Amino acid sequence: MDRDFFLTINRIGFSKWQKGDILLAELLWGDPDVTRFICASGRFDADDISARLEKEIYNETKYHVQYWPVFELSSGDLIGCCGLRPYRGGKYEIGFHLRPQFWGKSYATEAATAVIDYAFSVLKAEALFAGHNPNNVASSKVLLKLGFRYIGDEFYEPTGLYHPSYELRQNYPL
Ligand SMILES: CC(C)(COP(=O)(O)OP(=O)(O)OC[C@H]1O[C@@H](n2cnc3c(N)ncnc32)[C@H](O)[C@@H]1OP(=O)(O)O)[C@@H](O)C(=O)NCCC(=O)NCCS
């Protein structure tokens, strides 16, 4: 696959979602193992997938961030997405959605490390927010490993559940 990467870290290249990426978007968000913890039904239908793609493209245009598509440098394969979206109070929320064949290889941790660095050094963010479905143990482990601190539970409308929430400030010791 021939993609331009605006950011790379060890094994991963970060690209940007574009209008023609619907097949890649389906590969990721069309997989119920990926969306299980993301929305109440646990599935994205075709409309949900194209709406999500549109939203990512909109966020890049308006806020210069996305849950950017990430690729394995060695194979060129889509690993999933990892990046930022605007959160209230001028903060960004970090998130990661990986295709199942890439789970358990520390790709989420590696990708998020690059995103955190980008957020603090390029975007000059003061703090990052994160949340996860209470049943998503792997997500919690990744966030704690990255140095995020638990700040309480917050209602998350897409799942209808209270999600453990976290914050990372630039001056937190890792
Ligand atoms: C959550 C997710 C990003 C984790 O990514 P990953 O690259 O597999 O994470 P890592 O390989 O760094 O593993 C993180 C830790 O979770 C553990 N883990 C992985 N899957 C687990 C599971 N189902 N139950 C318990 N622990 C699990 C790993 O063993 C590892 O533990 P360690 O740090 O003690 O070694 C990935 O599973 C994913 O994309 N899932 C689908 C989308 C999603 O739910 N995204 C999060 C939305 S908030």
Image: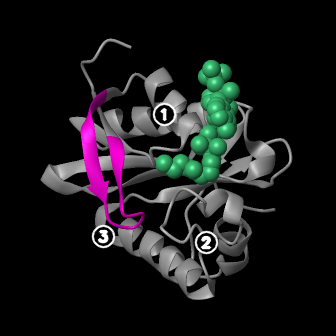
Q: Is residue 110 visible?
A: yes
Residue span colored magenta: 150-164
In depth, the one of 93 and 75 nearer the eye is 93
Q: CA distance from mark 3 to mark 1?
A: 29 Å
Query: Residue 26, labelled with which disc?
Result: none
Q: Residue at x 71, y 66 (%)?
A: 31
Query: Residue 140, labelled with which disc?
Result: 1
N-terminal-most mark, 3 or 2: 2
Looking at the rendered image, the quarter that the C terminus falls into is top left
- SS assignment at label 3: helix
Side of 162 where 12 appears, left or right: right
- The extreme left residue here reads 89
Magenta: main secondary structure: strand
Q: Tell me which amino acid carries mark 3.
A: Lys
Q: Tell me which amino acid carries mark 1.
A: Ser
Looking at the rendered image, the quarter that the N terminus falls into is bottom right
N-terminal-most mark, 3 or 1: 3
Query: Residue 43, labelled with which disc?
Result: 2
Q: Residue at x 39, y 67 (%)?
A: 158
Residue 156 colored magenta?
yes
User: Which residue is under mark 3?
Assistant: 62
Q: Tell me which amino acid carries mark 2.
A: Arg
Q: Are marks 3 and 2 in contact (CB under 8 Å)?
A: no
